[in-house]
Image (tube, helix red, strand yellow):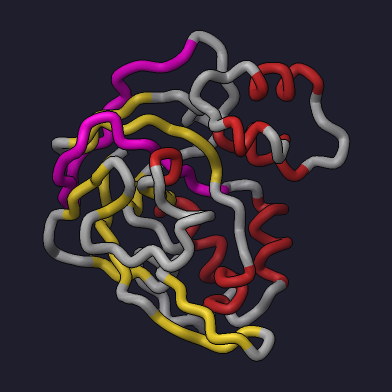
Amino acid sequence: MHIQSTNIATPKTFTWLEKKITTGIYKTPTPKPIYLGKEGIKGDHIADKTVHGGVHKACYLFSTDHYPYWKQLYPQLEWNWGMFGENLTVNGMNELQIKVGDIYKIGEALVQVTQPREPCFKFGVKFGSQNVLKQFIQHGFSGTYVKILEEGFVTTNTNVILVDRLDKSLSVKQLFELFFSKEKNPEWLDIALNCPVLSEQFKSTI
C-alpha cells in the first residue's frame, strides 16, 4: 500500500432542511505534505467535531480500489481524489485485510486503525442523492479512521507499512457489517466489545 493522494478541505456551506450547514467533506488533493496531529490534520477543516476529528477519528483513509465502483454509479460527478472526504487516499487498501488495532507507519507518522466510517447526510448532499448512504452500507467498504500515535508529515507515494496488530480483532469490513446488521454475529460482537482500541462511545452504538 502507498499514499496516492493527500487531501484537505476548506469549509463549504449549503442549505439542508432550511438550515445553513457547514462541512469539511469537500476535500481536494494538495501537493504539500500534510501533518497528522493527535486531534486531526493540520490545516484541514472539521465542521462538526462531535462526529469528526478527535483522538479516535484524527485521520480518515479511503482506498483507490473502490473509486471505479462509485464512478460507474455516479458518472455525472466531477471526480478527483478526496471525493469521499478522506485525508489520505491509499492505493491497494483492503478493508477485508486491515484490522482494528493495526498499527502502520506512514511517513513520519505512526497510526492505529480505530473504526470504519459511518456515512451521514452530508455525504448524500455531496453525491446529489441520499440513496448513496444505503448504497455505501450495502457495498461494505467504508474506509477507516485512525488515531495518531506519533505525529508527523505524510506525502504522496509514501508506503503504508504494517508495524503491529492485535492477537484477536475484526477486520474493518467485519466491524462495519456488525455495526449495521440487525442480527449481530455473537462471536464478532464479543470480539468488538472486548477490543481495547475501540472507543466506549463506538461500542455503545454497536
Residue 93 vertical placement versus 69 (above, below):
above
Q: Is the magenta stretch mostly helix, strand or loop?
A: strand
User: Left of 9 or right of it: where is 36?
Assistant: left
Camera-side residue of 13 and 175: 13
Residue 150 in magenta? yes
Instruction: Tell me where residue 18 sits by quadrant.
Output: bottom right
- Please report the bounds of the magenta region as a residue range: 142-166
Residue farthest along the top direction in this orientation: 167
Camera-side residue of 38 and 115: 38
**Residue pictured at 64% horizontal, 58% vertical:** 136
Quarter of the image that includes the N terminus: top left
**Residue pictured at 25% horizontal, 57% vertical:** 6
Residue 91 in magenta? no
Camera-side residue of 115 and 160: 115
- Across the whole image, how many numbered discs are drawn on residues? 0
Q: Indicate the position of residue 100 as horizontal and vertical percent values.
A: 50, 28
Q: Indicate the position of residue 179 as horizontal and vertical percent values.
A: 71, 40
